[in-house]
Image (tube, coloured by chain):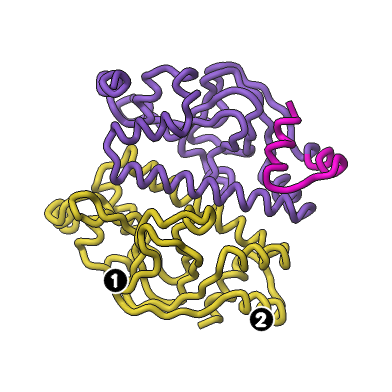
Chain colours: A yellow, B purple
């Protein structure tokens, strides 16, 4: 399982065995059951997570009681409420487990120390933060000028396995449409 | 003018005079007139920009010929089409100057070299990339669960000077509402 993590880091930088062992010591493994919360709205957020196995969703609950899904995250993704994690503020959204999930967690302080210790880990996290920025910008662009069908297709092309792993109601919530609208798109 | 840039960097890391002189040598100053393009949709994007003076907007033009404004950027902001800049792809949107604008520009290759040369500049850019990610996530959340009035107020609180610097039609385009709707909000 930590082989996946090493491969993930080595997509961007190279590591010796000793370096990897030392890097891994900054992280703690965690296991969550289906439906458990990783981050809860209004609560402090001390950890960032790397997903080894499983699938989580970030969401806010609207005044109408409905879930609005901001993001899904699965194997090889980093996830937390970054605003809360970085600025030591209460969480602005929830993250819970759609499947049983295995994670590696790191505190903000440990991440800073890890980046000070290894310049190349600072580089790794700079590259990942930039990739995250690009992914969010794509999502904003899709909100601004794509219709539901285009957004559905784009989601399907980006994450084909997602559709086997999450209920259709969640896909609808992510796209901001009703179940009925989603069904019309699915049969096309 | 480069004092502003040094102060901006030193909000996150400390620099000696020699270090700053060397860092500055990786950048080139550029000047654009009002209405000039910094980034053009479909064109390659070789530079990232730090704004010393002025104001720019990022936008896409919809099939209906309307401008959809993604983002404004002004003094002390970094701006480019990051997807195009990082992945060497054609630009997915335009950036043009709402005011005459003075910039410092850096190529992707020079930025990589700068970060290799100075671990602390890699740290600086990691922190900036994370801040950018957080800002975009706020914008996504506001798209998902705030009404127009809440989004208008949030924009006003975040960037009070913006309302003196850009025409109302651009504020309306950023919020995704008509001029008429905006006027109703403005008088409240």
Number of numbered tags placed on the structure image: 2
* Residue B16 image offset from top left, x and y in percent: 84, 44
Tag 1 near tag 2, CB within 8 Å: no
Q: Secondary structure at mark 2?
A: helix
Front-lying residue, A182 or A109: A109
Give me the residue at 34% from left, 68% from top.
Answer: A96
The label on residue A64 is none
* Residue B29 image offset from top left, x and y in percent: 72, 28
Farthest left residue in view: A180
> Which stretch appears magenta?
B1-23
Majority secondary structure of the magenta segment? helix
The chain ID associated with circle 1 is: A
Residue where numbered disc 1 is placed: A165
Q: Is residue B115 above or below residue A125?
A: above
Label 1 vs 2, first from the N-terminus:
2
Q: Is B5 a magenta residue?
A: yes
Give me the residue at 67% from left, 22% from top.
Answer: B31
Q: Is residue B161 above or below residue B15?
A: above
Q: Secondary structure at mark 1?
A: helix
Image quadrant where one finds the C terminus of chain A? bottom left
Q: Is B124 a magenta residue?
A: no
Front-lying residue, B104 or B45: B104
Residue where numbered disc 2 is placed: A21
């Amino acid at each position: 399982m930590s082989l996946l993590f090493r491969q993930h880091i080595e997509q961007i930088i190279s590591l010796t065995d000793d370096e990897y062992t030392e890097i891994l010591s900054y992280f703690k493994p965690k296991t969550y059951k289906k439906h458990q919360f990783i981050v809860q709205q209004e609560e402090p957020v001390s950890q960032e997570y790397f997903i080894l196995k499983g699938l989580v969703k970030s969401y806010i609950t609207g005044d109408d009681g409905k879930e609005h899904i901001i993001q899904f995250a699965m194997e090889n993704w980093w996830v937390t409420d970054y605003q809360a994690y970085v600025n030591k503020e209460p969480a602005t959204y929830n993250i819970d487990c759609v499947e049983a999930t295995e994670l590696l967690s790191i505190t903000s302080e440990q991440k800073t120390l890890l980046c000070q210790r290894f310049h190349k880990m600072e580089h790794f996290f700079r590259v990942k933060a930039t990739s995250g920025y690009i992914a969010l910008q794509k999502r904003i662009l899709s909100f601004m000028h794509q219709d539901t069908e285009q957004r559905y297709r784009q989601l399907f092309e980006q994450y084909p396995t997602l559709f086997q792993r999450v209920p259709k109601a969640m896909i609808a919530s992510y796209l901001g449409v009703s179940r009925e609208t989603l069904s019309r798109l699915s049969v096309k």
